[in-house]
Image (tube, rainbow, N blue to C red):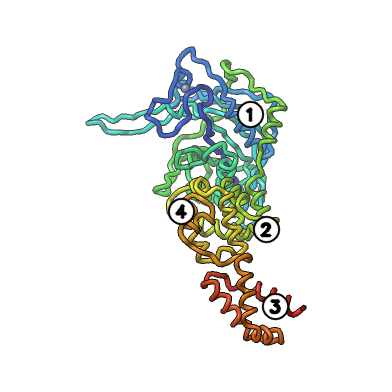
C-alpha cells in the first residue's frame, strides 16, 4: 500500500541571554561543571524564580518574525517528571496558555516556498546534563552538571504538516538561519543550542485520520533529523506492510550507527501533572511590548534574499550565499558603491569568503579589519578602473593586514597606478598629438592603426593602464576630433 508520511516537529532553541530563565546565574556554555548554579536553579527549598525579561523579548521577536498571535496573558506551568539532571523534579514550562500561537515558517525546496504552520511557541527552562557511565575502579559512576539547568529555551511546535525527511531538514535549516539572523540564539547544534524531536506517523495515502505516531527524541544535527526520520518511516512502513500495528513509543536515533532504539512507551500528557507554577505571576505582555517586538523585527533573510535577487539583480546563488548571515548581508549593502552590487558580490563571494575560510574565521573578523566604508572605497576604485586587475588583487591582500586607505597603501608600497581618467587623459592627448598621421588614418575609417594608438598610450603609462579604459578614452577623444 502507498503510505502518506505525517511529521510534526518540536524544536528547542536555547536563547542567547546573559542570565538563566528564572535566576541570575550566567547562561554560558563550557564553564567548570556546577559553577553557574544558585538556590533557584538547584531547586533548593524557599528559593523563588523570577522571569528573565530579555528571554521574553527574544520570544516575542521570534513570534513577530513568524507572524504568531501573542497572548496578552500567558502562564508558566510545572511539568513534573523525574530526571536526575532536573533538581526540582519539575520543569517550568508553559502548557495550555503558551506565549505564542499560530504563525508559520516557510521552507524552500527546489525554488518552491511552502509555509509550515506552527501550533505554538512557548518559553521554558532547560535541564542539566548527565554524563554516564564512567568507570572508577570497579564502580560505575554517573555525573551531573547543573550549569545548563534553567537556561532559557523556546519550544517551537509545528502542526503535523511536514511530509518528508528532506522537509524536516529544510525546516530546521530555515529555523537556524532565522534565530541567528534575529540574534536570539547562536543555533549551534553541536552545542545543543538547537535540537528537535519528531513525531512521525503513516496513514494510507488519501485518508484523513492520523495513524499511530512515535516520537524520535533529541535529533541534534540536520543530517541526523533527516536520516532518523527516514529510518523511522521505513520501520513503520515495514510493520504496516506486514499487516502489523505501530505502537506508540519514544525512540532514540543513534546517528553513528544509523539505528533506532526504543527509549520508552510514551507518557500521556496527564502523566506530567501540569499545573500553574504558584511561584510565578501570570506573564502579561502589553501592547507596547508587542509593538516594540514588531518594530525591532528586521528584514527577514528570505525577504532580503529575494530583494538581492530581484531588485539588486544578483544571481540567485549569490543572493542565497550572501544572506546566509545577517552580518554578511549587512556588509554587502554597506560596502557596495552605488549600482555596483554585482562587483561587490563578486569580491565577497570569491576573495573575502576565501580569506575567511582559509583562516577559519567569521565575516566579523574581516569586517573588524576592513570596515565596510574602507572596502567601499576600494571597490569604487576598482569600478572606476583606477585600480587595474593585478594591482587590485595586491591592494586587496594588504587591506586586512595594514591600516590606511587605498592611496596610502599604494604610496607605502611604492606602487604607481597610471590609471583613472585624470591620469590617463593627458597621456591619450599626448599620443594623439604625437601621431597626427595615424589619427588621420583612423578618422578616415581605418581600424588597424587604432591598436597602434592604444599600444602607445599603454607604453606611456608604463604598462599600468587598463586597455579597456585607454580604448574608451581614445574613442572619446577621436570622436571629438571627428566633430571639429
Ligand atoms: Zn541559578
Q: What percent of the width, then of the height, locates residue 261?
A: 43, 42
Number of other residues with Cα within 10 Å of mark 2, as a class: few under 14, some 14 to 19, many 20 or more: few
Reply above or below: 4 against 86. Answer: below
Q: Give residue 478's mark.
A: 3
Residue 433 as seen in the image, left or right of residue 31? right
Q: What percent of the width, then of the height, locates residue 315?
A: 63, 60
Q: CA distance from mark 1 to mark 4?
A: 42 Å
Mark 3 against mark 1, which lies toward the viewer?
3
Q: CA distance from mark 2 to mark 4?
A: 28 Å
Give whichever of 80, 346 is nearer the camera: 346
Name the residue carrying label 2. 339
Q: Image quarter for residue 82?
A: top left
- Dot 1 or dot 4, earlier in sequence: 1
Name the residue carrying label 1. 98
Q: Is mark 4 within 8 Å of ligand 1?
A: no
- Dot 3 or dot 2, earlier in sequence: 2
Give whichever of 183, 177 is nearer the camera: 183
Give the residue at x 64% y 74%.
Answer: 429
Amino acid at each position: 500500500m502507498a503510505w502518506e508520511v505525517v511529521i510534526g516537529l518540536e524544536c528547542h532553541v536555547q536563547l542567547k541571554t546573559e542570565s538563566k530563565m528564572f535566576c541570575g546565574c550566567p547562561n554560558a556554555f563550557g564553564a567548570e561543571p556546577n559553577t553557574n548554579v544558585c538556590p533557584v536553579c538547584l531547586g533548593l527549598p524557599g528559593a523563588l524564580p523570577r522571569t528573565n525579561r530579555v528571554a521574553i523579548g527574544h520570544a516575542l521577536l521570534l513570534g513577530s518574525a513568524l507572524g504568531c498571535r501573542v497572548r496578552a496573558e500567558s502562564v508558566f506551568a510545572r511539568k513534573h517528571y523525574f530526571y536526575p539532571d532536573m533538581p526540582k523534579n519539575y520543569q517550568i514550562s508553559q502548557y495550555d496558555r503558551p506565549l505564542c500561537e499560530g504563525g508559520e515558517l516557510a521552507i524552500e525546496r527546489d525554488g518552491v516556498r511552502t509555509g509550515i504552520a506552527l501550533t505554538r511557541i512557548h518559553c521554558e527552562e532547560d535541564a542539566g546534563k548527565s554524563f554516564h557511565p564512567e568507570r572508577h575502579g570497579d564502580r560505575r559512576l554517573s555525573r551531573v552538571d547543573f550549569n545548563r539547568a534553567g537556561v532559557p529555551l523556546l519550544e517551537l511546535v509545528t502542526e503535523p504538516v511536514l511530509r518528508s525527511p528532506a522537509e524536516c531538514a529544510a525546516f530546521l535549516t530555515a529555523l537556524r538561519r532565522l534565530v541567528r539572523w534575529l540574534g536570539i540564539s547562536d543555533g549551534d547544534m553541536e552545542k545543543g543550542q538547537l535540537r528537535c524531536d519528531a513525531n512521525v506517523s503513516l496513514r494510507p495515502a488519501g485518508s484523513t485520520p492520523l495513524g499511530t505516531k512515535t516520537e524520535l527524541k533529541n535529533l541534534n544535527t540536520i543530517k541526523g533529523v533527516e536520516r532518523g526520520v527516514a529510518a523511522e518511516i521505513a520501520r513503520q512502513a515495514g510493520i504496516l506492510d506486514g499487516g502489523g500495528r505501530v505502537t506508540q513509543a519514544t525512540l532514540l536515533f543513534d546517528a553513528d550507527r544509523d539505528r533506532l532504539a526504543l527509549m520508552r512507551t510514551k507518557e500521556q500528557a496527564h502523566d506530567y501533572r501540569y499545573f500553574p507554577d504558584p511561584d510565578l505571576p501570570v506573564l502579561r505582555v502589553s501592547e507596547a511590548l508587542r509593538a516594540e517586538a514588531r518594530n525591532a523585527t528586521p528584514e527577514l533573510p528570505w525577504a532580503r534574499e529575494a530583494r538581492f535577487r530581484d531588485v539588486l539583480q544578483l544571481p540567485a546563488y549569490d543572493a542565497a550565499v550572501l544572506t546566509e548571515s545577517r552580518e554578511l548581508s549587512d556588509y554587502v549593502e554597506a560596502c557596495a558603491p552605488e549600482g555596483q552590487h554585482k562587483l561587490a558580490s563578486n569580491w565577497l563571494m570569491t576573495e573575502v569568503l576565501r580569506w575567511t575560510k582559509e583562516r577559519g574565521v567569521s565575516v566579523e573578523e574581516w569586517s573588524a579589519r576592513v570596515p565596510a566604508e574602507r572596502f567601499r572605497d576600494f571597490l569604487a576604485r576598482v569600478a572606476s578602473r583606477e585600480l587595474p586587475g593585478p594591482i587590485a588583487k595586491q591592494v586587496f591582500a594588504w587591506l586586512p593586514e595594514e591600516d590606511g586607505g587605498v592611496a596610502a597603501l599604494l604610496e607605502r608600497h611604492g606602487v604607481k597606478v597610471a590609471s583613472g581618467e585624470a591620469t590617463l587623459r593627458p597621456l591619450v592627448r599626448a599620443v594623439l598629438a604625437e601621431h597626427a598621421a595615424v589619427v588621420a588614418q583612423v578618422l578616415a575609417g581605418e581600424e588597424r592603426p587604432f591598436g597602434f594608438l592604444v599600444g602607445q598610450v599603454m607604453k606611456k603609462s608604463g604598462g599600468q593602464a587598463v586597455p579597456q579604459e585607454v580604448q574608451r578614452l581614445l574613442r572619446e577623444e577621436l570622436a571629438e576630433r571627428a566633430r571639429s
